[in-house]
Structure formats: structure tokens, C-alpha cells
Image (cartoon, rainbow, N blue to C red):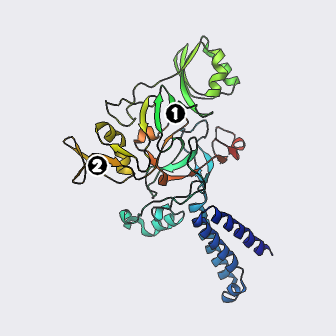
Amino acid sequence: MFIRFKVIILLVCLVIIILLQLFWLALIILISIVFCLFFNLVIFKFLIKNKWLQGIFKVIGLFILSILIRVFCIDIYTVSGESMENTLYSGDIVFINKLIYGPSVPASLYGIPWINIAWRIIHKDSIDYSTLYWDVYRLKGISQINRGDIIVLTTQPFNMHSILFIKRCIAISGDTIAIKNGVVNINGNLQSDPSLSKNPYYIKIKNIVKFNQKTDSLKIRTRKQIITKHELYMDLTHQEKTSIKNNVDSLAIKIVDEDNWVYPKDSIFQWTIDNYGSVIIPQKGMTIHLNNYTYRIYEKTIKESEQKIIEQRNGSFYIKDSIITEYTFQNDYYFFMGDNRHNSKDCREWGIFIPAKYIIGKTNVVLFSNNKFNNGYKRLFKIVK
């Protein structure tokens, strides 16, 4: 009876998924139904009378299903670094929803959980990595990528060397983004910062002892950089800034005027983390006229994500030996930043926009935390947004 109930539930899910046109997920459900029925049929028990063998086959079946679930449905990710503070902290274990945007099919064996470990152990140093990749593409999901989503992503095809990042989507395909004096502007509209995002502030005070007592009473435990006994820099969220505003003489965002890591590293741009752009986020089918300005902005995206190499020779642009004057993008792209705006490696530094196929999934739940500076139970199943 219990087996029939499970099969009925799976069939109902199958119908719903087909109505949503998620046919790839319908296939996984069908496989689950087959496993569920097969392992409980009399013929299975008749063919394999040895209970040990029955157990081994069931373990193999569950192993395959677990791989399918991790690749196509859900996974977990451990946050490292400070780029998403105070929204997420290093040590937070977050839930990744791959169904919402549709999962990216692994680009190699190294993108398949557990199989990658076994493959490396067996082959060790004899692997030719360049022969183990295929094209990355994304399956259909149930929602689009939206501004403000917190997303786990990579900056290159999924393989054993891929580094995962967790950032917030700031701009989507076709948007024009500009950052002026630390304030994000999308399509001409000023954007409010996420409620827990951090910015560095230049603060003037009369009595630093009383100021420290005030911040301690408000449980504001953040990095301080003392300049003089009446001046300091301090990283604050909007709420923290508001709570201490009446206890300081003056308070203003610390603007970075020079950066040696914001891309493009070129004197004609002079972009910084606080003054960036404006720039259009590429979308599929968008055509740009190639000149010194657009070439520098989009060069890395075209080379690393579109896999096309454009060379500049004597003032003209070439793909191989063919001269070109414009380029049409083949993918939709997105722009990401960390909530800890002055302490985040993101699209401002990478110099590339992120294609949809490199996005792993969305997260808005902290399962638990290993951060020793935050009470773990307070992070348990915490919703973040």
C-alpha cells in the first residue's frame, strides 16, 4: 500500500511537471517511478534471491537518484569570504534551488557529484582535461533570473577547476548599469541597497569612548579603522547607519577614487568600485559597433564566455583573418555584486558578465551555520533576501 501511495504521488508530480513543460524533470520522475516499482516487484526478488545482492542494487539505485537530484534539482553550498555580509556570513550552509531557473547540464565528468571524485582517483595524473568537456546549456526552469536574486554561480564552464561564488544579481540582460558615488543606477533609476548590504562610512565624532559604548549597546560589531581620536572609517548597513546617526557629528559614504583592480584597467575609463559605467549588459541578439571603447569593455566576455577571439590590428578588428566592424552576442548575460560592496570580488573586477549557463541556482535559505562568531541556532533555516 505504501509503495502504491509513493507511485501515485510521483505520478501526480509528473503530470504537474509536464503541464509546466519541464520535460527533463518529467524524465527524472519517470526514472524514480521505475526504480520504485522495480525494486519492489516479485520478479526482482525472484531473479536476485540473495538479500545482500538486493541490498547492493538498492544502494546503487539510490546513489544514481541522489546524483540526479544534486545535478538537476537541489544542492547545498558553503559560503566563504565576506563579500555577502551582513546578508550571508562565511560558514553559512545555504540551500541551492536549481529547479527555479533550470539546471545547467554539467560540462564534463567533473561537474557530476561523486563521479568526479572517483574519476580523479582512478586516473590521477593521466587525465587529458581538454578532451573531457562538452557544451554547457541550461534546461528550462519555472522562473526567470530577476534583479535582487541571491545566486550561486561560476565564471567558467563547470569542471574540476571551477570556483563557485555567491552574489546578488544587480542587473539583467539589456539593462544599463551605472554606479555613481556608491549608488547603483539601473536604466536611469536609482536603486536602494539590500537591507543588510554594507558600505564603508567616514565618521566624525567628539568622544570615541562614548561612541564605542553606543555601538556595543546596539550590538554593532563591525570593522573599524581609526584615523584620529575624532575620525574613523566603519562598515555599516543602512539600519546600523540610521541607529547611530544621532550620535555622530557627521557621517558620509567613503568613496574610493582610485582602484587598480576594476576592469577595464585603462586610463580612458578610470572606473572604480564606487563610480562604474555606464555600460549595457549584453543580451542575446544585441549587436555592438566595435571601437576602442566597446572592445575594451566586452573583450573578456566575448573571449571567455562566447569563446570568440577578437584581435585588434592597426585600428581594425579581426576574428581569425576576417575583418569585422560589429559583434552580435550569442547569450544573455547578468551583472553580479556582493552585498559587502567594498569587499567583494565580482563583475566589477572579473571584467566579464555572467551568462545564464554559468548560473547554478538561487538561494534564499540558510540551512545552518558553522560561523563561530554568530550563534548557529539563529542562522538555522534563516530566510535571506
Determine which residue is flagged by label 2: 310
Horizontal side of residue 72 vs 327, given as left or right: right
Residue at the spot 55% in from the left edge and 28% down from the top edge? 199
Q: Is residue 323 above or below residue 62?
A: above
Quadrant of the image containing the C terminus: top right
Which image quadrant is residue 72 in? bottom right
Neighbours of disc 2 within 10 Å: few (<14), some (14-19), many (20+): many
**Residue at disc 1, secondary structure:** loop
In the rendering, at what x and y percent does residue 86 appear? 61, 35
In the rendering, at what x and y percent does residue 97 appear? 61, 54
In the rendering, at what x and y percent does residue 181 appear? 48, 25
What amino acid type is highlighted by mark number 1? Arg
Residue at the spot 47% in from the left edge and 35% down from the top edge? 177
Give the mark nearest the N terminus, 1 or 2. Answer: 2
Determine which residue is flagged by label 1: 341
Horizontal side of residue 369 vs 133, given as left or right: right
What amino acid type is highlighted by mark number 2? Ile
